[in-house]
Image: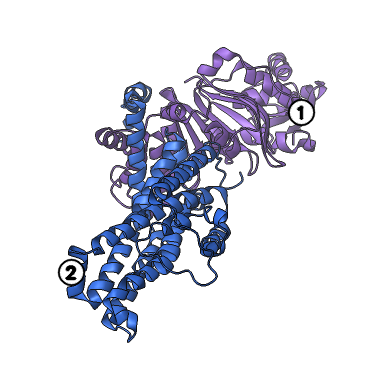
Chain colours: A blue, B purple
C-alpha cells in the first residue's frame, strides 16, 4: 500500500482530539507521577547502560577489588592481625576512599550528566518538547540518578565491609554481625552512603545545569570537602561531608591540624541534608523553567 | 486545501517589499490567535547577536515554509515557536497557547528538529514509545500510537530494528514518526528533507501534503528552494534575522513590482511582437529567442503587458503557441530579495 493511501485512511485531525484527551483527563498528580516514572525508566537505562555509565562500574568495584586482595594477601601489620582494629580499618577505607572520593566522583559523574550530558548529546529537546512540567523532569531525572548511585555505592559500601571482615576473620565476623554491633554499623554506613548520594546528587545536578564545563566547579567542591577538617566551626557546616561525618559509627582522627568540633546530632544532620537537598532541587527547577536550548546557531 | 495567505501577511509583504523589514506590520487581531500561529513583534537576540528581529507573522493551516540561508533565523523562529528559546521581546501564540505553557502546547504541537540523536541501543518502536510514555500515555495507548506513527512513515517493517543500524533517511523518518506520534495539530519540521534520497523525499513530501490536507499546520524550514516551491501553500523568506517577504509564492512575486518579470511568448512572428513590445514604457528588455520562435520580454508591469499582448495578437493576427513566465519561482524571488543592491539584506 502506498504511503499516500495509508494516510488517506487515517483522518488525522479527527484522531487528535480523541487520542490526546487521554493523558489530560488524568488528575495532575496522577499524570505527573506517570510522567516522572516514565522519565525515571528512561534515565535509569541511560545511567546503567550508556557508554558514560561504563566508567562507573570499575569505580564502584575498586574497593571490593582492593579489599578482596587485602583479604587474600593480608599484610603483617597489627591492624590486620587484630579483629578489634578492623572497625578502624574499615572506617578509614570508607571515609577516605569510598565516601570522600568514589561516592563524590560517582555522584558528580552521574548527576552532572543528567542535563549537561543531554545538551552535549543534543537530546534534551525531546524532554523539553513533551507536555511535561519541567519540575517533573528535574524530579524524574534526580530520582533516576539517586537510584543508580544508591544501588551502586551501597553495594560497594556494604560489600567492602563484608569482604574485609569475613575475608580476614570469618568466625569472629559471624558473631560480630549476627550477635554484635556489626549489623548496626553496616546499616549506618549504608544509610550514610544513601544520604551522601542524596546531598551530592542535588549539588551536582545543579552544577551540571549552571556550568557549561562543570569539571572545574566539581574539583573546587572536592577541595572544599577535603579541607573541611581545617575549616573553622562555622564554615564546616557549609559542606555535605560535615553532616555525613557526624553520622559515622566509628569516628576517625583527622590529624593534628584538624579543628575539632562536636559532631552534629543525627536528628539535626539528617533533616539538614534533606532540607538542603530540597532547596537545591527547588533552585534547579526555577532555573530549568527558564532554560533555553540552542545547541548550535542556525 | 486552498493555500492561505492571511490579510496581514499580504500587508507585511508590501512593507517588506518597501525595503523596511524592521517596520512592524499591522497589529494582529486578537480573534485570530486561537486559530493561527501568531508572532507579534518578536525579536530574539543572543547577547548582542541578532537571531530574528521584529517578526510579525500569522500562520494558517497548510504548509508554510521558512526559507533562507544558514544563519537567516529559520531555526531560531522554530525554537521560539516551540518554547526552546524565549523571545527577547514580543509575543507568540500557537493556536491560542503560549509556548511557555509546555503542558498544554505540546499536546497540540510536534517538533521534528534536525538533531540526529537517539538513545543508545533503542529500536524505532522503543524510541517513539519512550517519549509517548513521558507524555503520560498508558502502555496500551503508547503502543497503539507508536504503531500508527510508524505506519504513517512506512517504517513498520523496521520498527523493531535498532536505530543505530538505520540509514539517514530512515532515521529522519523515525524522528518524524516521533514528532507526529501524539497526533499534534501543529507540526514543526526543521530541514526535514535533508539527507533523503529522491524517492524518500517524494514520499515525505506526499506525507506532508496529506497531513496538511487533513487540517494540520505544518511549518517547514528549508534552504532547498525548489522543494519548498513544490509543496508549500505559503512561504516566509528570511535573511539575516529579518522577514523579507511572506505570503503565497506567486503573491510574494506580484508584490515585487520593482523587479521585472520575465516572460517568454512563443508565436509565429516574433519580430512583429517584439517591435510593439518595445514601444511599451514599462518594458525593460525584449529580444527574439535563440530559436527565433518566440520573444523574451522583461517588464515591470505584467498586467499592462498582458493587455498590450492581447491587443497586438488581435490586431496582427499572431498565432501564439504559449505565454509563460520564465522566473516565477521561489528561487528567482529569493535571489532578487536578498541580493538586489543589498536593499533587502
In the shown orientation, is residue B121 left or right of residue B70?
left
Dot 1 alpha-carbon crowd within 10 angstroms: few under 14, some 14 to 19, many 20 or more:
some
Under circle 2, the secondary element is: helix
Residue A97: percent from the left, percent from the top? 41, 68
Q: In this view, does B339 lie to the left or right of A21?
A: right
Residue A236 appears in the rendering:
yes
When asked about the image quadrant of residue B273, the answer is top right
Q: Are marks 1 and 2 on the same chain?
A: no
- Chain label for disc 1: B
Residue B19 numbered mark, or none: 1
Tell me the quadrant of the picture where the N terminus of chain A can be found: top left
Left or right: B257 as drawn, with respect to B86: right
User: In the drawing, does residue A38 fall left or right of residue B338?
Assistant: left
Neighbor class of circle 2 (other Cα within 10 Å; few <14, some 14-19, many 20+) is some
The front one of A52 and A121 is A52
Question: What residue is drawn where x is 43% and y is 68%?
Answer: A96
Q: Which of A109 and B297 is in front in this view?
A: A109
On the question of residue B163 being in view, the answer is no
Location of residue B205 in the rendering, given as x and y in whole percent from the top left corner: 45, 35
Q: Name the residue under label 2.
A: A174
Between marks 1 and 2 in the image, the one whose residue lies nearer the viewer: 2
Residue B308 image position (x, y, % from top left):
73, 17
Verify CB contact (< 8 Å) between mark 1 and mark 2: no
The image shows residue B85, relative to residue B282, as above or below, that is below
Callout 1: helix, strand or loop? loop
User: Percent from the top left, x then y, of residue A175?
Assistant: 18, 68
| Quarter assignment of residue A33 | top left
How many numbered markers are drawn?
A: 2
Q: How far apart are marks 1 and 2 (CA)?
A: 88 Å
Compared with residue A172, is residue A28 higher up or lower down, i.e. above or below? above
A276 versus B239 height, above or below: below
The residue closer to the viewer here, A199 or A127, is A199
Amino acid at each position: 500500500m502506498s504511503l499516500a493511501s495509508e494516510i488517506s485512511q487515517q483522518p488525522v485531525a479527527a484522531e487528535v482530539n480523541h487520542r490526546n484527551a487521554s493523558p489530560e483527563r488524568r488528575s495532575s498528580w496522577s499524570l505527573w507521577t506517570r510522567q516522572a516514572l516514565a522519565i525515571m525508566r528512561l534515565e535509569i537505562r541511560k545511567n546503567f547502560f550508556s557508554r558514560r555509565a561504563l566508567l562507573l562500574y570499575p569505580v564502584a568495584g575498586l574497593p571490593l577489588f582492593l579489599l578482596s586482595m587485602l583479604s587474600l594477601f593480608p599484610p603483617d601489620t597489627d591492624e590486620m592481625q587484630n579483629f578489634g582494629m578492623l572497625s578502624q580499618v574499615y572506617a578509614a577505607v570508607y571515609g577516605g576512599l569510598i565516601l570522600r572520593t568514589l561516592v563524590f566522583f560517582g555522584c558528580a559523574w552521574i548527576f552532572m550528566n543528567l542535563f549537561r550530558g543531554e545538551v552535549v548529546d543534543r537530546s534534551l529537546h525531546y524532554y523539553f518538547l513533551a507536555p511535561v512540567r519541567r519540575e517533573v523532569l528535574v524530579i524524574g531525572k534526580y530520582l533516576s540518578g539517586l537510584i543508580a548511585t544508591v544501588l551502586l555505592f551501597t553495594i560497594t559500601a556494604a560489600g567492602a565491609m563484608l569482604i574485609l571482615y569475613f575475608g580476614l576473620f570469618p568466625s569472629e565476623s559471624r558473631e560480630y554481625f549476627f550477635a554484635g554491633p556489626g549489623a548496626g554499623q553496616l546499616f549506618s554506613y549504608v544509610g550514610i552512603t544513601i544520604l551522601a548520594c542524596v546531598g551530592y546528587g542535588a549539588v551536582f545536578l545543579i552544577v551540571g545545569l549552571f556550568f557549561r564545563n562543570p569539571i572545574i566547579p566539581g574539583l573546587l567542591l572536592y577541595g572544599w570537602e577535603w579541607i573541611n577538617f581545617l575549616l573553622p566551626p562555622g564554615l564546616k557546616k557549609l559542606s555535605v561531608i560535615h553532616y555525613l561525618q557526624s553520622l559515622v559509627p566509628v569516628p576517625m582522627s583527622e590529624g593534628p591540624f584538624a579543628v575539632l568540633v562536636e559532631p552534629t546530632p543525627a536528628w539535626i544532620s539528617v533533616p539538614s541534608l534533606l532540607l538542603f537537598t530540597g532547596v537545591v532541587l527547588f533552585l534547579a527547577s526555577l532555573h530549568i523553567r527558564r532554560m533555553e536550548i540552542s545547541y548550535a546557531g542556525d | 486545501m486552498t493555500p492561505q495567505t492571511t490579510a496581514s501577511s499580504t500587508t507585511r509583504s508590501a512593507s517588506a517589499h518597501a525595503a523596511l523589514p524592521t517596520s512592524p506590520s499591522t497589529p494582529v487581531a486578537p480573534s485570530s490567535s486561537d486559530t493561527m500561529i501568531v508572532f507579534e513583534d518578536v525579536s530574539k537576540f543572543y547577547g548582542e547577536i541578532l537571531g530574528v528581529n521584529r517578526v510579525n507573522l500569522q500562520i494558517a493551516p497548510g504548509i508554510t515554509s521558512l526559507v533562507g540561508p544558514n544563519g537567516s533565523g529559520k531555526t531560531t523562529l522554530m525554537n521560539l515557536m516551540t518554547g526552546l528559546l524565549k523571545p527577547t521581546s514580543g509575543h507568540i501564540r500557537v493556536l491560542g497557547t503560549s509556548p511557555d505553557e509546555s503542558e498544554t502546547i505540546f499536546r497540540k504541537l510536534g517538533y521534528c528538529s534536525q538533531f540526529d540523536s537517539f538513545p543508545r541501543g533503542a529500536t524505532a518502536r522503543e524510541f517513539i514509545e519512550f517519549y509517548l510514555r513521558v507524555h503520560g500515555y498508558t502502555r496500551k495507548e503508547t503502543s497503539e500510537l507508536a504503531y500508527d506513527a510508524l505506519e504513517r512513515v512506512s517504517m513498520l517493517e523496521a520498527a523493531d530494528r535498532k536505530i543505530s543500524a538505520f540509514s539517514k533517511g530512515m532515521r529522519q523518518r523515525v524522528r518524524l514518526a516521533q514528532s507526529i506520534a501524539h497526533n499534534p495539530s501543529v507540526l514543526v519540521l526543521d530541514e526535514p528533507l535533508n539527507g533523503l534520497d529522491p524517492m524518500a523525499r517524494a514520499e515525505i513530501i506526499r506525507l506532508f501534503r496529506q497531513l496538511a490536507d487533513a487540517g494540520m499546520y505544518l511549518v517547514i524550514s528549508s534552504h532547498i528552494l525548489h522543494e519548498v516551491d513544490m509543496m508549500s501553500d505559503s512561504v516566509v523568506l528570511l535573511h539575516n534575522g529579518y522577514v523579507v517577504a511572506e505570503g503565497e509564492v506567486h503573491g510574494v512575486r506580484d508584490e515585487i513590482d520593482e523587479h521585472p518579470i520575465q516572460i517568454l511568448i512563443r508565436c509565429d512572428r516574433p519580430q512583429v511582437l517584439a517591435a510593439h513590445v518595445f514601444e511599451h514604457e514599462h518594458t525593460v528588455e525584449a529580444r527574439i529567442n535563440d530559436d527565433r520562435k518566440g520573444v523574451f520580454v522583461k517588464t515591470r508591469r505584467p498586467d499592462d503587458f498582458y493587455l498590450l499582448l492581447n491587443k497586438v495578437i488581435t490586431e496582427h493576427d499572431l498565432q501564439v503557441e504559449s505565454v509563460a513566465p520564465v522566473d516565477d519561482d521561489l528561487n528567482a524571488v529569493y535571489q532578487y530579495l536578498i541580493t538586489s543592491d543589498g536593499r533587502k539584506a
